[in-house]
Image (tube, rainbow, N blue to C red):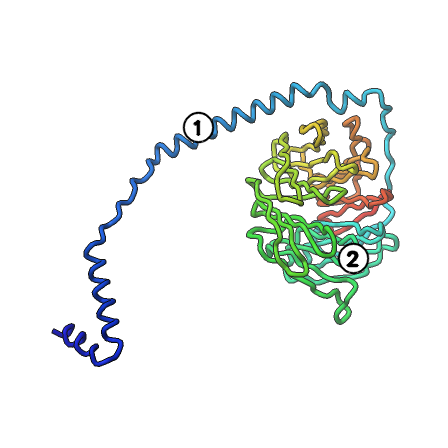
Amino acid sequence: VNGHHFLLSLFQFPFSLVLVALLQQVFASGKHTTPQKTPPPFPSSSLKMSFDQLKVENDQLENKISASRRACSDTNLIRATASIPTLPRLNMRVRRTLRGHLSKIYALHWAADNRHIISASQDGKLIVWDAWTANKIHAIPLTCTFVMTCAYAPSGNLVACGGLDNSCTIFSLRDEHEGRARLVRELVGHNGFLSCCRFINDRQILTSSGDTTCALWDIERGQRIMEFAGHSGDVMSLSLSPDKNLFLSAACDAQAKLWDLRDGRCRQTFKGHDGDINSVQFFPSGEAFATGSDDHTCRIFDIRADQEVACMSHETINSGVTSVAFSRSGRLLFAGYDDFNCNVWDTLKGERVAILAQHEQRVSCVGVSDDGQALCTGSWDSLLKVWN
């Protein structure tokens, strides 16, 4: 009855006829609609069978590719360079010791001027050093004390860092604010710790993360331009090619991947390590690269051959490799280890030619200046040492 009174009251308004017509259409459509039948669920057993079949096919294809690589591998780097004389024992000395951090040093990076170095420590500071005088130029306090990476822009105007805050923080050294480096941008978007960052120029920066991805960022807009996904483990390191069109990523899935920055595609995947890869570095020519791993080895991969060409290890080395860096010519490979040493390898012979043993804790990072005149090592003993 209340419903009839409601409908009658509607006729007191000019738009009542429209409402009644709408109600009739709703009731009519409700009478003639039939419930749609939902398709039967896909059997879980069939889904599992399809997945297993695809996995078997994938393994078969990988085995075929590996067999093709081995068939084309008629020699390796050590055999091909057998006629080249062995390097004499190197005698490298510490020229400067940079003191100022109060806790473990996790990362360092040389500036393009071959004079300045930036370092990141667990004491919550970025420090810019003059490697010639051992003086501190800037000391930048950070909101996150657990910083894992740092980078110098090619122009020398900007520096960047990142860590467990999952973001990349960028500072300007040219435009100071109250005597301190000015905060330019915080790039937020990764879902895991920031493991490495490298500037392409003052407008773009590349980052890698524990969320298994790498990302290219527009610094001015603070936006992610491109994402590179393909690893199945934490991405620990990246390296830009000399022409900056390609970059390498290394991860805890024991794989290194070559990516194209122009289209975002993964061009090649390199396997060979038996443990997490902690560091990757392009060869100076851009046609090969080196990796350092928790499996106690350094390996060299040739991009053109699409496979490993050399493995550097020693029976007395039982600790993981934390970082790697080439000399300017590429003949030497410097590698930091958990056993407090930095080993120097002859890349053509696969032999160790020097042991740099001046640190009292883990050597966490190594870097060579662009002119090849100096090596810098950073350690958990809170010290940076400059060698030549």
Looking at the image, which is closer to me, 343 or 340?
343
What residue appears at the point 86 percent right and 44 percent down from the top-left corner?
371
Q: Is residue 92 left or right of residue 197?
A: right
What's the mark number on residue 206?
A: none
- In the image, residue 246 sits, relative to residue 60, either above or below, namely below
Seen at 71% across and 27% down, the residue is 309
| Residue of label 1 | 53
User: Circle 1: is it few (<14), some (14-19), or many (20+) Cα within 10 Å?
Assistant: few
Q: Percent position (x, y) of residue 179?
A: 77, 69
- Number of marks in picture: 2
Location of the C terminus by quadrant is top right
Which image quadrant: the N terminus? bottom left
Q: Nearer the viewer, residue 311 or 201?
A: 201
Q: Nearer the viewer, residue 231 or 375?
A: 231
* Distance of label 2 from label 1 (alpha carbons): 55 Å
Is residue 299 rendered to the left or right of residue 10?
right
| Residue 361 in sight from this viewpoint | no
Q: Is residue 286 above or below residue 124?
A: above
How far across and down, in percent of the image, does residue 157 sit? 78, 59
Residue at the farthest left position? 1
Q: Residue at x 57, y 40 (%)?
A: 231
Q: Earlier in the sequence, mark 2 or mark 1?
A: 1
Q: What type is the residue that disc 1 sits on?
A: Gln
Binning the other alpha carbons within 10 Å of mark 2 as few (below 14), some (14 to 19) or many (20 upward) gives: many
Which residue was labeled with disc 2? 128
Quadrant location of residue 284? top right
The answer to which of 139 and 150 lies nearer the viewer is 150
- Name the residue at 84% across, 20% down: 83
Viewer-nearest of discs 2 and 1: 1
- Where does residue 193 sit, x and y in percent of width and height? 59, 51
Vertical side of 162 occupied by 53: above or below = above
